[in-house]
Image (cartoon, grey):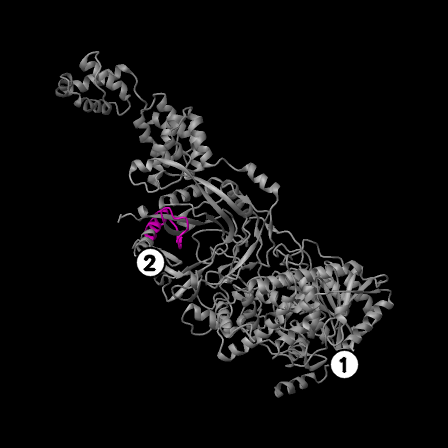
Amino acid sequence: MDSLTSQRAGLESGEFSSVELVEATLSRAEAEGRTLGAVVGLRGESALSEAAASDSRLRAGEARSPLEGTPFLLKDNMVMQGEPTTCASKILEPFISPYEGAMAEKLRAAGAIVIGRTNMDEFAMGSSTENSIFGPSHNPWDPTRTCGGSSGGAAAVVAAGVTGYALGSDTGGSIRQPASFCGVVGMKPTYGRVSRFGLVAFASSLDQIGPMTRTARECAWVLEAISGHDERDSTSIPEPAPRLESALDGDVSGLRIGLPKEYFVEGGTDPEVLARVHAGIKELESAGAKIVEVSLPHTEYVVATYYLVATAEASSNLARYDGARYGRRAEGVQDLDEMYRRSRSEGFGDEVKRRILLGTYVLSAGYFDAYYRKAQQVRTLVRNDFQKAFDTCDLIAGPTYPETAFGLGAKVDDPVSMYLGDIFTVSANLAGLPAISIPCGFAEGRPVGLQLLGPALGEAGLLRAADAFQRRTDFHEKRPVLDGISERIQELEKAR
Amino acid sequence: MSRISPEDVKRTAALARLSLSDDEMESMTRDLDRILEHADQLKALDTEGIEPTAHAIPLRTPLRVDRAAPAIDPEQALLNAPLREGTAFAVPKVIDGEGE
Amino acid sequence: MSQDPMDRYEVVIGLEVHTHLKTDSKLFSPAPVRYGDLPNHDVHPIDLAMPGVLPVLNQKVVGLAIRLGLATHSSIQERSVFSRKNYFYPDLPKGYQISQYDEPVVSDGFLDIEVPTKVNARSKKEKAETCVKRVGITRAHLEEDAGKSIHDTAVAGSDATLIDLNRAGVPLLEIVSEPDLRSASEAVAYLRSLRSILRYIDVSDADMEKGQFRCDANISLRLHGESEFGTRTEIKNLNSFASIEGAIHAEVIRQSEILDDGGQIVQATMLYDVDRNRTRVMRLKENADDYRYFDDPDLIPLQIEEAFIEAIRSELPELPEQKRVRFAEEYNLGSAEAEILVSSRSMADFFEETAQACDSAKAAANWISRDLRRELNERDLEVSDLELEPVVLAKLIRLVEDGRLTAKNARDLLPELVDRGGDPEQIMQERNLEAVSDSGLIDTLVQTVMQENGEAVELVRSGDDKPLNFLMGKVMQASQGKASPGEVRKTLVEKIKGNGTSGEVS
């Protein structure tokens, strides 16, 4: 019962109750979830009492949604009333949210059970879930490696079968890259599809919440539940939640899949990864899809563009963590300026400071036009690239990330090389487009992700193709071996 | 070297209300310089006349009807306050001449 | 050298007015806008800048900004943008203020104000000679107010600064004038006129005591005839007409002393110390923060359609200036009287309703601009606060006009009507105040008074009119104020001097 599909079936048939499911999930979350460094907070008692209420609804035939009674985890940057949210940062330790965020609200209204929170890079800034006050998350397929980031904890819990689904947030690939590293499905919807109300902002014009699941069908269920217009978010698209499951008919005949030549250049991407991705695309082709070559000529500029835009917004979004109203205030401060400086310097980790500094710098007098405004202009060019590409294809395919999961500690001292890995993921955020990563094979025993990108509001098309792919492959059914993982992680920690 | 000087980093850190140790100053200056070096490749692109994108998805401003909702319970508002006095947040005194 | 710096220098003033918009909820949050509540009782998580909150624009402020724009002949921008102004201060919870920066909603307007023809008018006579001056309005933009920092340790009772965010997020319109003003009194005239318009069009209550109407003044001096502007300073946070006038005078003196000594003005932000009547430097502009303005990514640029603007234009009420001209013509009023009557929309409406109900605009204007205004001033009330209905005042006026109540008794009744209301006619009858026009009764009273005051009567008869007032007073007293004074005087003169006319007695 480690997938959402099996959990739904079990709950609907009465094979087990939500309380039983939540109990079992909580104990796995305590064991594997904590061991992997993927789970950072649990709300056992409240979750169980909500599960009991859910059971009465299930028994009465009053299930609120297909997710009724199913347990899941929020990422630790999504607030829930009365619960802690830390963003894996010392500066929000402690913080208890006095209000309910849209995700907790929507999924609870759908009958789903929030059991706790997953690990992440501090304020979602990172690609490895190593920048966390809770310590790193370990990849269930190989605990010496990262599970990607920033939604690494969410990817790990789904891969390890702790919960059937989890929510991630994606600013430059933070759902798709960890999904790719951990062999699960991760989708970043169209910007504005899912409400950001209650999502702690990293970069407002890029952030988007999305599901992490095992299958495209499960992804559709979760996305239906979390999307839809929210008048509390000015950037929410005024469209109702899409009906997605009906689109999953397995039919991709005639579907035009564009392969951007810039995504398949020699030398950039691990050849093993490229080979798996090519094989995945072949699979879709044999199912009737047509392959066309397209071009995204500004691909080489997207990483720089992304980091200028994202850090500028972040530098302003993170100004509210000042030690005045909530969160951490440094001890023994004598005056206001000292309160600001010490609370922030002691509260933020290195990567967050680096990005705040970069963002502050590119917005400051004399640099705004050369960096920030320039990046916004290039953002227009990137959008235009996609618009043009979608004239000749229905969706775009390529690798999610240039390599498989890298080793813990391998890139922490080299921010630029860490950033460059985002080359295939940040474009979807810059252009606001939906994108999904699905498991398409293994390289040296580690999962490889195939990324599909679609036009705005094209989630149904992406899910149809992803589902068609999963009907013909079984990569999503592979499970990491977790026996003895606890000992291995303990040894690793000792070695560190 | 160098696109950004230690003085620039110092000034920027002051704007962002961050204090950096000498070591941090050195490593941050180095990192920022490398990041900006990478960012400088954008200069090669001709963006004359290109409208900047602030929002990728075109939307209209949503407007909220002017109706007051109940305020949050002051105890909830102050739930996380590091220091309070009555229902006010308390912060160390402001030294004259700062801010607005 | 002349004592008055204005004889040597031309004063150049531009004003930035921050006015609270009249809304029930805040600019970007649904928290209520209220005044005088305990700290942090009027806040939403959005105003506290809790992690994860997002702003959504209040619909009403858009219409209010457009109204002000139309009332000041400005253009309304089809597209305007909300930016973030980044700086740290504890009353600014997000670490940035959302404000319109390079694309404001309103721009390029003007306001016509009445000012003394002579800029440096000193005498009463000089001040009375006025002309209309056009003051340019550069722009008006929407922004959110900050909270309040309470620094006074006596209030705080400790060494801490206390933060109250009730005001954080209250919608403000910042109205920026061109540097067209040339004296403190012109500045005040502009502000009074602007405040009056804001109230007329119901955009703001503009109550200065509540901090709803605050002003920053930019001031520079230049020699008369010079075409370049001098270096300016900005005085922050002026919140009464007296402090605005005082601050400008003080700053003009400070700058002129520096210039007279051959010094240079340094660009700075100033504070005005009311007690010492001096301005002092708060901070130098060269140390100013770098605000790092950029478009707020949480908000979409505001689009305003022409049809929406036209709908607001069609509902725009008559403005004070238009009303003043109309009153003068339609009701044949003097300009001073008309000026008073249009000082607020409620005053003007009260006048028109009263005038119609008592069928005498002249009398209504007189009563309202003098007697009623005095009662209001004594009570520190506005017309809009009054329980007194225009029809009630009209009844009182009608009684006087019909000679049924003496003006004096009517004036005596007014405070009671203002405080407690009631029917003037009924009160008049209950108190037996109806004017005595019965000549027989007046004859009798005059007769009696004459008998009791033979000496005075003799003096009058011998040509000394001085005691006549004394005798009149006696008769009025005897009539309990009900006798018509004209009638009494006429009877007295007749009886003492025969049918002959007497000198004017008043």
Q: Is residue A215 visible?
A: no
Q: Which residues lie in the magenta part?
A: C223-251
In the picture of the structure, the residue carrying the numbered disc 1 is: A445
Query: Residue C44 at x, y = what percent?
Result: 53, 57
Query: Residue C475 at x, y = what percent?
Result: 22, 22
On the same chain, marks 1 and 2? The answer is no
Instruction: Please give the count of numbered marks on the rendered protein.
Output: 2
Between C311 and C118, the residue placed more toward the observer is: C118
Q: Is residue A9 visible?
A: yes
Find numbered disc 2 in the image and state the secondary structure of the residue it sits on. loop
Q: Is residue C272 above or below residue C304?
A: below
Residue found at the far top of this picture: C499
Query: Residue A9 at x, y = what percent?
Result: 78, 67
How crowded is the residue under tag 2: few (<14 C-alpha within 10 Å), some, or many (20+)? few
Residue at 51%, 80% in the rendered image: B23
In the picture of the structure, the residue carrying the numbered disc 2 is: C263
Q: Is residue C397 above or below residue C81?
A: above
